[in-house]
Image (spheres, grey):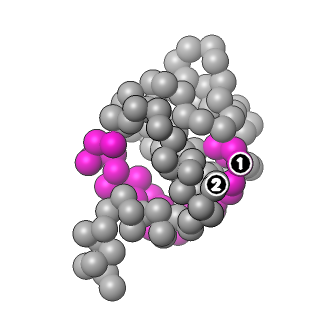
């Protein structure tokens, strides 16, 4: 993941503004880690949109569990879904995932 995206995503996770969910990108007002990446993409690029719990990229496809290819490409990801693994399989909190994405901040604040 591009450093700039990684750091912004970690900051969002640490902000306390976002509730966390598992199993899908978004559930009401809660996001999984990959869903938060989609939200960052939407805010940064002004592309993509949410319709309910589905994220629509600039194409007509919609996504509920994994980010669209264009989000991965923008973030510098290769589609390996490690955010989904940390969030859904390992059940890590946003704070724990943020510590993986930006360990420098973890060391400075603790």
Q: Locate residue 35, reporting x and y percent.
A: 57, 44
Residue at (69% x, 54% y) in the render: 22
Q: Is residue 100 above or below residue 31?
A: below
Residue located 27% across and 47% down the image? 4
Whether 48 is drawn above or below 39: the answer is: above
Q: Taking the image as drawn, is residue 103 in sight? A: yes
Residue 20 highlighted magenta (yes or no)? yes
The residue stretch that appears in magenta: 1-26
Task: Answer whether residue 96 is magenta in the image.
Answer: no
- Would you say 64 lies left or right of 15 here? right
Q: Quadrant of the C terminus?
A: bottom left
Label 1 Cα neighbours within 10 Å, binned few <14 / some 14-19 / many ≥20: some
Circle 2: element type: helix
Which x, y percent locates residue 80?
A: 47, 38
Residue 36 appearing in the image? no
Tag 1, which secondary structure? loop
How many residues crowd around disc 2 within 10 Å: few (fewer than 14), some, or many (20 or more)? some
Total count of labels: 2
Q: Which numbered disc, 1 or 2, marks the residue that appears first in the sequence? A: 1
Of all residues shown, which one is farthest toward the bottom? 110
Which residue, given by chain and number where applicable, does mark 2 sit on? 88
Q: Residue at x 56, y 65 (%)?
A: 92
Check disc 1 and report the residue beneath it.
23
- Circles 1 and 2, Cβ within 8 Å, touching? The answer is yes
């Amino acid at each position: 993941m591009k450093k700039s995206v990684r750091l912004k995503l970690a900051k969002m996770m640490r902000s306390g503004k976002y509730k966390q969910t598992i199993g899908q990108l978004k559930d009401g007002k809660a996001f999984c880690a990959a869903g938060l990446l989609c939200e960052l993409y939407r805010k940064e690029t002004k592309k993509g949109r949410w319709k309910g719990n589905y994220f629509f990229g600039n194409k007509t496809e919609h996504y509920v569990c994994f980010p669209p290819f264009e989000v991965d490409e923008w973030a510098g990801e290769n589609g390996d879904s490690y955010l989904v693994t940390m969030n859904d399989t390992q059940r890590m909190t946003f704070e724990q995932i943020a510590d993986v994405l930006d360990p420098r901040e973890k060391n400075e604040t603790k």
